[in-house]
Each structure stands twice: as structure tokens, then as C-alpha cells.
Image (spheres, rainbow, N blue to C red):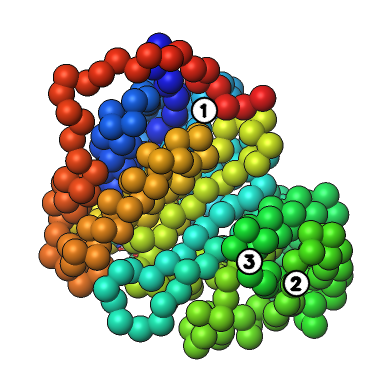
Amino acid sequence: MTTSYTVDVIAGDGIGTEVVPAAIACVDRAAELHGFRMDWRHRAWGSDHYRRHGSMMPHDGLEQLRDGDAIFLGAVGTPDIKDDVTLWGLLIPIRRAFHQYVNLRPVKTVPGRSGQELDLLIVRENVEGEYSEIGGRLGRGTPDEIAVQESVFTRRGIERVTRFAVARAAERGGTLISATKSNGIIHTMPFWDEVVAEVAAEGGVRVDSVLIDALAARFVLAPDSIDVVVASNLFGDILSDLAAAVAGSIGIAPSANLNPEREWPSLFEPVHGSAPDIAGRGVANPTAAIWSAAMMLDHLGETAAGAAVHDACFGTLADGIATGDLGGTATTAEFTEAVLDRLGRPESPHPTPAAATSPRHRP
Ligand code: NAI
Ligand code: MG
């Protein structure tokens, strides 16, 4: 029996529905070449579901995802529905229900482009911090109106995300940078600094605490001086868009929402949103989605297939084939075809793999 993986696909809105098929085509090709099978469970969730049913996903949506091996998401968001509805109705509940507390965002320069070379990892805390539901508004519409939004930082939450970041820094032989703002935010950020320092010391990795404003400038001025960054939910969110822009385009930035213990499915998605300004024209850059899919294969244990997909995508970029956001002329379909060509075709007829292996990688 061939190893197979069950992956829930939420293409979502806008260019999500254009870049997800591109990534799936690459993964299916890699699966053929490397002798495993993908069982895609397509979920028609997102803004259309909201328009028809009043919710972004079915009421038992999380339950439906629970037994899958991974989740692959395009993007959600549309101009006619408020962004907090689309985000809190789908992505944030998935991240939290499945304890995807690490948001891993690698950033690399587009091959063949001039400018600063960069190759770094942002490890963003993904389930607590500034993005909390605690707070409220009083006196709506009056001159005395106030809004209060509480940040929630827990020792357990900071420790586990830092442990993950420390392990990555140790693997890469680099230093860990911790994004902070302990001069202005006087309760949560000093706490963050202390716990990060403790965990880094245990892991034998040097940590530099850098104020987020100075760090933002450093991302622009000296990105090659940055290797692994650990950051809170908000800081990590902003830094990763910034880093992607410095690297060339938001259209290349991938991400993994990881449950490192593998008790629950992890979710893989491009960093970019639904890009309503270019949606429907077939010109979106599928690199971020394809690279995210490569990270998914790696997570599923198909490391060779993951590397093949990543290398085919970056090889295509190095050949000078690129979509409009990178100054090229290729459409989404043309770029994807070029990646598939680089991946190659299986020699037919396809040999039947001999050994039966378990489809489950979770304990
Ligand atoms: P966005 O990432 O959708 O677009 C920002 C800019 O980058 C646009 O000019 C867009 O055309 C360009 N761009 C993005 N991805 C591209 C790609 N693959 N190829 C070429 N160009 C690309 O961010 P924006 O405009 O702030 O948000 C649009 C919608 O997406 C909103 O509703 C927002 O809430 C949602 N969104 C959803 C996310 C998610 O599902 N995880 C993440 C970010 C935004
Ligand atoms: Mg963002």
C-alpha cells in the first residue's frame, strides 16, 4: 500500500483560489515522483460560505479537520465583509483549536535579484499575545468613547515558542534575535524578555533583545545581519510582511502554523492575503503557496519531495521566469507549468511501491 496523506484544502477567497491549485499541482507531481499519495479534502469555506450561511465555516468545521494530516489554506478576506469577521471566523479558531503556537516564516531573496542577500527565519508566537479577545468598548459614539484591548502573555506560551526558535537557531549555528518593546510596554515585554533569556540560556544559544522599532529599521538597512527572530504575535506579523517586501515581494512569503508536538494538524499558507486588486486575472505569484506546500511536505516527513518542490520553484525564479509582482511577465499558470517541468515527469508506467507504511505521523 502506498503511503497517503489526508490534507484539508481551504482555498478561500480571491487569489487563494488561484495559487492553491498551482501548489496542489506541484505536490501531486512530487507525490507521483516520490511514491506517495495525497488525498485532498476540498472545503468550500470562506467568504462565499459566510454570504450563504452566515459563518465562514460549518459549525462543526474544526471537528471535520481534526483527523487530517495537515491543512492547506489559500487566503481569506474580501472587501465586502469586515476583516475581523473573516479572520476570526476561520483562521484564528483553527490556529487556536489545534494549538498551532508556532508561526514559522522563512524569508529568502529572490534568486537573481540585485540588492541585499537575505536568508532568515521569523518564529512568530501564534496563539496569544496582542491578538486577544479580552477587552471591550464603552460609550459607543459618544465623545467619551473608550476601547480597551488586553494582551495576554503566559510563561508557558513564551517558553514553548522560544524553545522552537532556539532549536532553529542552534541548527543554523546562528544567534537568536528577540523582538521586544520593553522600554514602552512595561509589563508584558519585560516578562517576554526574561522568559526568552531563560530559555535561550538553557538551550545554549546567544540571544539579542532588540527593540521592535530599531529592528524594523535593521530589516531594511542590514537584513543580512539577521538570522532567526522570535517575536510576539503582533510584532512577528508585521516583521514578516516587512521582511517579505525587502526580499522582493509578499507573493513569495510562505508560512507554517505548527503544532510541533503533532497532536493536531498543522496549517500551511502563504503569508499574503486574497489580493482583491489582482484577483481573477490569473497573474498572482504562486511562489508563496508552492513554498508553503513544500514546507507541508517536509512536515509530513516527505523531506525529499519537499526539497524537490522548493528547489523547482526557486530554480524557476533563478531562470528569470517570474510573475508581474517580481517584474516578470509570466501568468500564474505559466509559472506553475515551468515549476512542473523542472520537477520532471515520472517514468511511466509508475512502479508500485512495495512496502506498506503508516499514513500517520502523529503519535
Ligand atoms: P494582500 O496580501 O492580499 O495584498 C497586498 C498587496 O500585495 C496587493 O497589492 C496584492 O496585489 C499584492 N499581492 C499579494 N499577494 C500577491 C501574490 N501572490 N502575487 C502578486 N501580488 C500579490 O493584503 P491586503 O490587500 O492587505 O488584504 C487583502 C485581503 O486579504 C483583506 O481582506 C485581508 O484581511 C486579507 N488577508 C488575509 C490573510 C490570510 O488569509 N491569512 C493575510 C493577509 C490579509
Ligand atoms: Mg500579516
Task: Report whether the residue tagged 2 is closer than 8 Å to ligand 2.
Answer: no
Q: Which residue is mark 1?
A: 69
Q: Within 10 Å of the Cα at label 3, are there few (<14), some (14-19), or many (20+) other Cα atoms?
A: few
In front of the other: 346 or 160: 346
The answer to whether mark 3 is within 8 Å of ligand 2 is: no
At label 1, which amino acid type do we have? Asp
At horizontal 50% and vertical 34% (from top left) the residue drawn is 300
Amino acid carrying mark 3 in the image = Gly
- Estimate the spatial distance between the alpha carbons at disc 3 and disc 1, rounded to whole Å: 31 Å
Provide the residue designation for mark 3: 173
First in sequence: mark 3 vs mark 1? 1
Q: Position of residue 139 (x, y in %)?
A: 73, 62
The residue labelled by disc 2 is 206
Q: Are marks 2 and 3 in contact (CB under 8 Å)?
A: no
Estimate the x, y position of residue 144 in percent, counting from the top left.
74, 72
Q: Nearer the viewer, mark 2 or mark 3?
A: 3
Q: Secondary structure at mark 3?
A: loop
Q: Give me the residue at 67% from left, 25% from top.
A: 363
Q: At 85% across and 72% down in the image, what residue appears?
A: 190
